[in-house]
Image: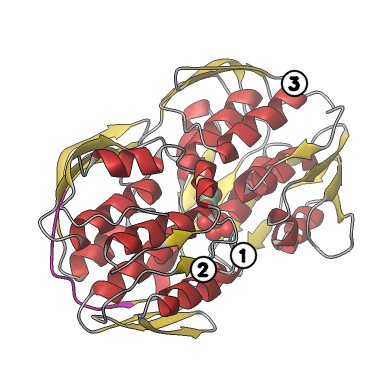
Amino acid sequence: MLQKLHQPLRGEIEIPGDKSISHRAVMFGSLAKGTTEITNFLQGADCLSTISCFEKMGIAIENKNNTVTVHGKGLHGLLPPSEILDCGNSGTTLRLMSGILSGQGFSSVVTGDSSIQKRPMKRIMEPLQNMGASITSMKGNNCAPLQIRGCQLHGFHYHSPIASAQVKSALLLAGLYAEGCTSVTEPYISRNHSELMLRSFGADLTTQHTTVTIQPNPLLTGQKIQVPGDISSAAYFIAAALLVPGSQVLLKNVGINPTRDGILQVALKMGANITLQNERYQNGEKTADLLVSYSELKGTTIEGEIIPTLIDEIPIIAIMAAMAQGTTIIRDASELRVKESDRIQLITENLAAMGAKIEATDDGMIIEGGYPLQGAVISTHKDHRIAMSFTIASLLAKGETTIVDRDCVAISFPDFYEKLASLSE
Ligand code: S3P
């Protein structure tokens, strides 16, 4: 049962490390020669799954006080795992690692929890097979568990039908082991953390519009990586401060890479009062502190190329839309149906249970804002982003809200509830 918070949120918090960047730092550090030191590493369950998989392939990794040290053994240093590689709930671990495993000299099996075993893997299997990989769905349903037999790969140019950083990154990582160069063209630019970080490790990688090309067999060298705070985690506090009257919060150290900052663009368009302070770059990633103040929001339309830059924030944007005046239309976001849960369905069901006017569409939703919310029982299907979004909704609702399986926030934000409580003391 959540305590309903009426009082304004005030104060400042540090945002925990970026999930996408934390995964990549462990993976690329494992494939580099020498030591990679990662500070502000996200201690979420997903990133711990990545550490555990690379440990099973013989990489020594220390994890103390939010700093992770990876003792990389070079591109060809991974050992055959003696067990199945368990990615837990993490699609990023499973898809990116499949790219790496396709180019090894050994066989492996990758899988994860019941949610990930339902998520589509054809999107990486097909293009990897085109590069010569032997990768099969063991249940024949194009989902994990996947059996991957290491093969000699050859580069090719993949035109991806979807803007997906997981697909793009899986192919770029396979491209490290291929003969010839590998290119990926996407319909819109997806998050570019792999490109920025691989380049800093020494990879030869070029970007032109929505095409990225990587050359094989680089010498990757261990790096010091400072992980910026995750804008996807900051999003819950951005929304809370915008929506709870009288609030003002300072969110420190938030990554604002332009391929991830769609939530800021949309919030500003909806009338949000957000100012950026202390803008700087860390390992090529733009970072800032965000001062967010209560604002009266208005509805908007969200579609097209901005969608990949805010795809994980749509659950919390839907809550903002429900509290805004006017109509919000979200289109071109059918990817939401194949995330940790079918997020279009869960957002719609839960917001409707709270009294919002919302209609699901095939690729998004239409929300008529301004109807008062009331407490409800929220089903999460153990989807961390649904649990956090509806916790913020509960602050704005009359009566009690129960978030089923609320502990699933540990996937990406283990101390989410503590941080939220600290702003209302
Ligand atoms: C991620 C890419 C996105 C995002 C996911 C993390 C990444 O997925 O939704 O949470 O780290 O590359 P897609 O590539 O499937 O869009």
Helix, strand or loop at mark 2: loop
Magenta span: chief secondary structure: loop
Q: Residue at x 57, y 48 (%)?
A: 213
In the rendered image, which residue does mark 3 sit on?
A: 77
Residue 64 x/y as whole percent: 50, 16
Vertical arrangement, residue 146 with respect to residue 368, above or below: above
Vertical arrangement, residue 135 with respect to residue 45, above or below: below
Is the C-beta of the residue carrying label 1 under 8 Å from the nearest atom of ligand 1? no
Asked if disc 1 and disc 3 are in contact, CB closer than 8 Å, the reply is no
Viewer-side residue, 371 vs 58 = 371
In the rendered image, which residue does mark 2 sit on?
A: 187
Image side of residue 353 versus residue 79, left or right: left
Image side of residue 312 versus residue 393, left or right: right
Helix, strand or loop at mark 3: loop
Figure quarter occupied by ligand 1:
bottom right
Residue 15 x/y as whole percent: 33, 38
Q: Which disc number belongs to residue 160?
A: 1
Is the C-beta of the residue carrying label 2 under 8 Å from the nearest atom of ligand 1? no
Q: Amino acid at mark 2?
A: Pro
Residue 219 location, quadrant: top right
Residue 381 x/y as whole percent: 60, 61
Q: Amino acid at mark 3?
A: Gly
Q: Residue at x 24, y 78 (%)?
A: 299
Q: Does residue 314 appear in this view?
A: yes
